[in-house]
Image (cartoon, rainbow, N blue to C red):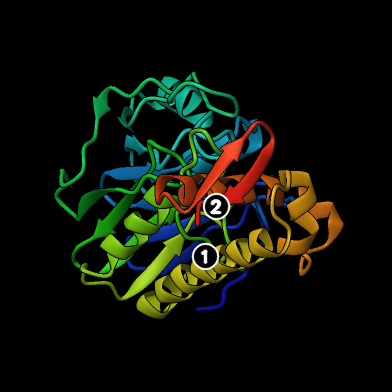
Amino acid sequence: METDLAAGKLVELAPGVNRLIAPNPGMMTGPGTNTYILGDEEVAVIDPGPVIDGHIDLICDLAPGPIKWILVTHTHPDHSPAAASLAGRTGAERLGRPAPDGQHQDKTFNPDRILDDGDIFQTAEFELEVIHTPGHASNHLCYLKNESGWLITGDHIINGSTVVIDPPDGNMSDYLTSLESLMDKVLTAIVPGHGDPIDSPYEAIDWIINHRLEREAKVVAELEAHPNSTISELLPHVYGDVHERLYGVAKRSLLAHLLKLDDDKSAKQEGDHWNLTR
């Protein structure tokens, strides 16, 4: 599904499902963060985004009914910080999981209700199944709209790019396990935190899993060719297909791959250097 990805414009994706893009475009956010507005009589807002007053104003002005709930997929700074301000304006209940320790976490998000895997969030108009999907973030949640099979994925799956797995909170083993668990769900579309909906959910999930495993195989091959290497030394070999301006984020994903190999007992770290175990 292709739509207008302009910030500040309310787009109806389906009856009772609207998207409003925050004006925070960038290398990591694409066109901007997708805020979803669900319901007509009573409204749930998913991922209100960063604290941008104009965006929060539009959420309040364009919501078709009173905002009763604010749900968050995870507490990265482009997804959850506006929850506090929006809740202050509307009195809405905040739902999600608290921010873990570490950098790049929104400590202002204090959920009134903590959601766990398998919980059902239900209104008079729709139902969401809560799916805990750690990997990109340890507290990451996806929301499955059971009536339609639409999976709201935050940064677990986005359109147009793969996501960064940034240790220590980001975990590649958890990410792959979380992706595989979604294959057992009844899905008709992925509704991501950035970009347009994806109409072939299983193909998209399968592509991401294969992409990560292919990158892992490349890490192994480069460790074979360049034993006792540091991450900085491995980086141009493993990520030679990406522009150097992306090396900063690629380095974090490379570390995530190496840590997964360590978990699998396939590689080990000695000081700053990495080697295969065999």
Name the residue tied to disc 1.
212
**Answer yes or no: do the residues labelled 1 and 2 have beta carbons within 8 Å?**
yes
Residue at figure coordinates x 56%, y 49% from the top left? 258
Q: From this view, report whether residue 12 is shown above or below residue 101.
A: below
Residue 38 percent location from the top left of the image: 34, 52
Residue 191 percent location from the top left of the image: 42, 63
Residue at figure coordinates x 28%, y 22% from the top left? 112
Name the one closer to the observer, 226 or 91: 226
Identity of the amino acid at label 1? Arg
Would you say 123 lies left or right of 34 here?
left
Residue 239 makes an appearance in the image = no
Q: Which mark is residue 257?
A: 2
Earlier along the polypeptide chain: callout 1 or callout 2? Answer: 1
Residue 87 percent location from the top left of the image: 41, 25
C-alpha gap between disc 1 and disc 2: 9 Å
Residue at figure coordinates x 25%, y 28% from the top left? 114
Residue placed furthest toward the front? 278
Identity of the amino acid at label 2? His
Would you say 77 lies left or right of 95 here?
right
Would you say 103 lies left or right of 94 here?
right
- Crowding at dot 2, Cα within 10 Å, few <14 / some 14-19 / many 20+, comes out as many
